[in-house]
Image (cartoon, rainbow, N blue to C red):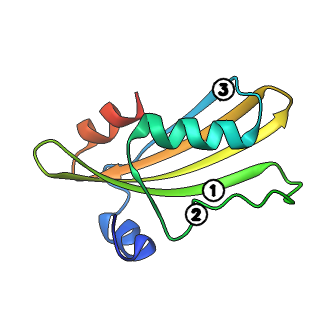
Amino acid sequence: PVGDFKSSWNKMGKANEVYKKIGLQFGSLQEAFFSITNFLGMHVCDGTDHLNEGNLTLQKMLHLSGTLIGGHSILARALIFSPQNNICVLKLLVRSESKDISQTVIE
């Protein structure tokens, strides 16, 4: 994982950024949180891996970092929001050294 996510995120810039909003079916925000981090296979940064069980807003922001085969660095911000039971919305923003790599990760 990167040492300072915010600095790395800003340094990478928006040139190769890709955004996608996805509707997912999960029983809880906690289930969505663990499933998404496992599926992406990225490291959680900046202590965003802690869920506050008392948080009634039903949303969670994750900062994620990873490296693809070939040494390509990837950063992602994932906002998981649960507007109603069993439905979660994932807003995923990915940055990397290449638009193609960002697109591959987001799909």
Residue at 66% across / 26% down in the picture? 23
Asked whether the beta carbons under mark 3 and mark 2 sit within 8 Å of each other, the answer is no
> In which quadrant of the rendered image does the N terminus lie?
bottom left
Q: Secondary structure at mark 2?
A: loop
Residue 93 vertical position relative to residue 11 in the rendered view, above or below = above
Residue at 81% across / 56% down in the picture? 53
> In which quadrant of the rendered image does the C terminus lie?
top left
Residue at 24% across / 36% down in the picture? 100
Residue 19 lies left or right of residue 41; in this view the side is right
The residue closer to the viewer here, 14 or 60, is 60
Q: Position of residue 95 (x, y in %)?
A: 36, 52
Residue 7 lies left or right of residue 83; in this view the side is left
Asked whether the beta carbons under mark 2 and mark 1 sit within 8 Å of each other, the answer is yes
Which residue has dot 1 on it? 61
Which residue has dot 2 on it? 48
Q: Name the amino acid, label 2.
A: Thr
Asked whether the beta carbons under mark 3 and mark 1 sit within 8 Å of each other, the answer is no
- 3 or 2: mark nearer the eye: 2
Q: Quadrant of residue 35?
A: top right
Q: Quadrant of residue 4?
A: bottom left
Upstream in sequence: badge 2 or badge 1 = 2
The residue closer to the viewer here, 63 or 106, is 63
Residue at 15% across / 41% down in the picture? 69
Q: Position of residue 77 (x, y in %)?
A: 51, 54
Q: Position of residue 2 (x, y in %)?
A: 33, 68
Q: Secondary structure at mark 1?
A: strand
Which residue has dot 3 on it? 23
Q: Name the amino acid, label 1.
A: Met
Upstream in sequence: badge 3 or badge 1 = 3
Upstream in sequence: badge 3 or badge 2 = 3
- The answer for how far apart the CA atoms under marks 2 and 1 are is 7 Å
